[in-house]
């Protein structure tokens, strides 16, 4: 989709490049992460208001390090180089970069020494986050130093006439407290962006684009009840109404009452053409006796394709298949050093579908991050229990039931998990918990209930805080919440006599147990 105002972010492989995009979008300015070697002539055709060169793990002094098209600096478009991007700017324009013998990593205090639009409205002394080995040793002609630190004489530089800037630190990370304002200054004060990109505008533009693309044809969507597919369903329904057909596969491994909630919301309240495949027995039979996590995933994936395909055939003639692909999903590594990335995903079909089911793909959320998808959902009127729903694994409760998958064990975990969610939802700060759920362990322990000895199941409770799921720390739930969770599970869920709390972080542990 075309945007009248946008910032191009050339990715040189930094682990936090996506954070640059998030910070820019927080300023209500649209941006995209694109290939590091994008030609200036191609970029000029898309007319970005500004260009950001990201950080990266390579050294600009090494042979084969990722470079930019030097003509970028002749486009007359404002440029900001961050860390590696600053070094690349300096070297490309005739400056010198010194190969560091010691890496500078961590917090540093920086002093702003000359007026610079990046630091407009900020104090002279700023905390920043350094993460670099190389340093700019000599600036190119026309540049001046605008900030220094104890270990970095050129912490920031500018060529005000050409609107080219460089910072040696990372403004995108939280460890640079005023970094978001610096990036906002670049986008709005330097590049002249108006900051009017908002979700209502995204929805309006997307509806027009969807109608133009689909025309009188029909669209099929696999609706899971999760945030992404739910928002896609609501958006498509608003755009094309009865031309949308949704297939919901109830595999029997969903959360308590989830299948009914999906049917009531989308089938009844929204009036979407919803086709539910009640396939609990098919999935449970296929999983009988299987305990290996990878085998579980493969069986569930294959069974899902079979069930979905059968339902899809009954819908009738459909040209498009909709998917809830998000922006992080379309950024894939394309560099031999494993760093720079680009939007190179291109799908013509969903993986594994039979040959007779060929669709053109439509991905209305592929420009958005997860928090932006939730904002779209709220704008479309989806209830909070859908919009704020936590990540849920594709295989469902199968990877939260360690060992055999049986109807009885699924029922038990659904009831235990319900109590975990109900008690945490009572917390005022429950949205601070990124994900929380129950896990059924493949062991039994001795207990006492009344005067009787019991030998029953153990349930583990998992609650984590995270920004994106890549890393996570266990959440320090209040003791009274843990107490109520344990008490309710043991007293209300027959077959459980012990509850434990998982206090491991990711890494080394994963969020899910399987």
Image: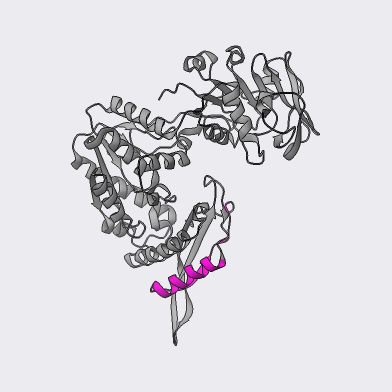
Percent position of residue 241, x then y = 24, 36
Q: Residue at x 57, y 25 (%)?
A: 188
Queried whether the magenta region covers residue 319, the answer comes back as no
Outermost residue on the bottom side: it is 451
| Snapshot quadrant of residue 53 | top right
Residue 223 in view, yes or no? yes
The count of marks equals: 0
Percent position of residue 177, x then y = 66, 39
Considering the image in quadrants, where does the N terminus appear? top left
Q: Residue at x 40, y 33 (%)?
A: 200
Q: Residue at x 45, y 59 (%)?
A: 425
Outermost residue on the front side: it is 121
Closer to the camera in the image, 233 or 341: 233
| Snapshot quadrant of residue 488 | bottom left
Q: Residue at x 48, y 79 (%)?
A: 446
How are the residues colored?
A: one colour
Percent position of residue 175, x then y = 66, 41
Is 220 on the left or on the right of 114, as rendered?
A: left
- Up-down relation of residue 296 to residue 336 (above or below): below
Closer to the camera in the image, 337 or 330: 330
Q: Which residues are magenta?
A: 479-507
Percent position of residue 505, x then y = 58, 55
Is 306 on the left or on the right of 229, as rendered?
A: left
- Up-down relation of residue 354 to residue 451 (above or below): above
Queried whether the magenta region covers residue 481, the answer comes back as yes
Residue 352 in view, yes or no? no
């Amino acid at each position: 989709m075309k945007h009248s105002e946008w910032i191009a972010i050339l990715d040189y492989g930094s682990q936090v490049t996506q954070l640059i995009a998030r910070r820019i979008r927080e300023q209500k300015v649209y941006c995209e992460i694109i290939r590091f070697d994008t030609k200036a002539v191609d970029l000029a055709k898309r007319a970005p208001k500004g260009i950001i060169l990201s950080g990266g793990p390579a050294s600009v002094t090494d042979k084969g390090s990722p470079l930019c098209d030097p003509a970028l600096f002749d486009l007359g478009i404002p440029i900001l180089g961050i860390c590696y991007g600053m070094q690349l700017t300096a070297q490309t324009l005739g400056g010198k970069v010194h190969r560091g013998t010691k890496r500078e990593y961590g917090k540093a205090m920086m002093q702003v020494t000359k007026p610079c639009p990046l630091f407009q409205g900020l104090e002279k002394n700023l905390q920043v986050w350094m993460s670099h080995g190389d340093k700019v040793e000599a600036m190119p002609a026309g540049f001046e130093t605008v900030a220094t630190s104890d270990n970095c004489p050129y912490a920031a530089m500018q060529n005000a006439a050409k609107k080219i800037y460089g910072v040696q630190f990372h403004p995108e990370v939280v460890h640079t407290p005023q970094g978001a304002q610096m990036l906002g200054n670049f986008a709005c004060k330097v590049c002249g962006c108006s900051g009017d990109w908002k979700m209502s505008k995204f929805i309006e533009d997307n509806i027009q684009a969807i109608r133009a693309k689909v025309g009188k044809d029909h669209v099929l969507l696999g609706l899971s009840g999760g945030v992404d597919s739910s928002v896609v369903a609501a958006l498509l329904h608003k755009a094309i109404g009865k031309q949308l057909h949704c297939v919901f596969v109830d595999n029997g491994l969903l959360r308590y009452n989830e299948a009914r909630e999906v049917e009531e919301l989308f089938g009844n309240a929204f009036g979407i053409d919803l086709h539910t495949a009640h396939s609990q027995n098919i999935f449970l039979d296929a999983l009988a006796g299987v305990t290996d996590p990878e085998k579980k995933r493969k069986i569930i994936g294959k069974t899902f394709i079979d069930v979905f395909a059968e339902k899809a055939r009954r819908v009738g003639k459909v040209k498009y298949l909709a998917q809830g692909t998000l922006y992080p999903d379309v950024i894939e590594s394309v560099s031999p050093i494993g760093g720079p990335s680009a939007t190179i995903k291109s799908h013509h079909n969903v993986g594994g579908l039979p040959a007779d089911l060929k669709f053109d793909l439509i991905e209305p959320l592929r420009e958005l991050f997860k928090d932006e998808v939730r904002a779209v959902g709220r704008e479309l009127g989806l209830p909070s229990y859908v919009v704020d729903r936590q990540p849920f694994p594709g295989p469902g409760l199968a990877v939260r039931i360690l060992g055999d998958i049986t109807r009885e064990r699924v029922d038990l975990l659904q009831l235990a998990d319900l109590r975990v969610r109900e008690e945490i939802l009572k917390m005022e700060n429950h949205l601070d918990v990124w994900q929380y759920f129950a896990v059924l362990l493949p062991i039994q322990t001795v207990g006492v209930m009344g005067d009787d000895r019991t030998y029953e199941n153990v349930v583990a409770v998992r609650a984590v805080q995270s920004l994106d799921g890549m890393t996570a720390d266990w959440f320090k739930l209040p003791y009274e919440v843990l107490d109520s969770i344990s008490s309710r599970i043991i007293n209300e869920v027959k077959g459980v006599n012990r509850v434990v709390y998982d206090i491991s972080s990711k890494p080394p542990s994963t969020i899910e147990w399987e």
